[in-house]
Amino acid sequence: MKIFLDTSNIDEIKSAYNTGMIDGVTTNPSLIAKEGKDFKEVINEIVEIFKDTKDTSISAEVISTNAQEMIKEAKELVKIHKFIVIKVPIIPEGIIAIKELSNQGIKTNATLCFSANQALLAAKAGATYVSPFLGRLDDIGVSSLDLIKEIRTIYDNFDFKTEILSASIRSVDQVSQVASLGSDIITLPPKIFKEMFKHDLTDKGLAAFLKDWEELQNKLDK
Ligand code: G3P
């Protein structure tokens, strides 16, 4: 399963990239706004971090709500770098844009997906990725894991190539949960990515190993 980072913070991306575990980055207008910097400047900085990788995926979102305008924005964004994937909201105009961009060989990430029917439309339109927002669904009492299961079944039934990119992740437990349900990718806030490495028993176990080792060295030195 691929792991993307869901942030526009350059320091966080650099630090996570250095672990060798990050396959891409997703951004959205809210995450860009949080950094208070120019959109294209941020995207260029992210591209720079990944410049030595063979293949990666950096999602940049359009802000138009009209298909032709979305396509125009997309064409400008893909000029930045071949790694750029165009994030398009699943609204009727967005589906038109995704279909056209896909016909032109431009990669897309169909975002703000909250239902299996929306995921079906995104796949039919030829989206490269579909982004179901798990946390926001759980917030309103709808099971996000059931949605992942349903999308997986539909995509497998019809051999759709669109990859499921689980987004809006709120807890580290959701990582292994969506992995076991067959999500192709998960995009994580940096904090949750860091939590993936952690277990109290690992820390306690390591401390005990090092202590025993040191005691043995002290004994042997005597
Ligand atoms: O990638 C989409 C994600 O950023 C949305 O997350 O936490 O704002 O629901 P959240």
Image (cartoon, grey):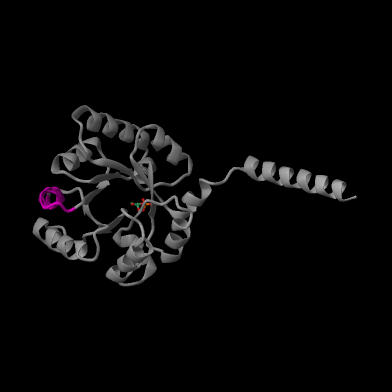
Quarter assignment of residue 57: bottom left
Left or right? Give the position of 204 relative to 10: right
Asked whether residue 100 is drawn in magenta, I would say yes
Task: Please determine whether, in this image, residue 10 is positioned above or below residue 95.
Answer: below
Q: Nearer the viewer, residue 72 or 111?
A: 72
The structure residue drawn at horizontal position 32% and vertical position 58%, both measured from the top left corner, is 27
Q: In percent of the image, x 17 and y 49: which residue is there?
A: 91
Q: Quadrant of residue 58?
A: bottom left
Q: In the image, residue 207 lies at what x, y percent?
A: 71, 46
Relative to 29, residue 156 above or below = above
Magenta: main secondary structure equals helix
- In magenta, the rendered stretch is 93-106
Coordinates of residue 77 in the picture (x, y in percent): 21, 64
Q: Residue at x 43, y 47 (%)?
A: 170
**Residue at left offset 44%, top offset 57%:** 17
Residue 195 position in % (x across, y down): 52, 48
Determine whether, in the image, residue 2 is placed left or right of residue 163.
right
The reply to whether residue 142 is in sight is no
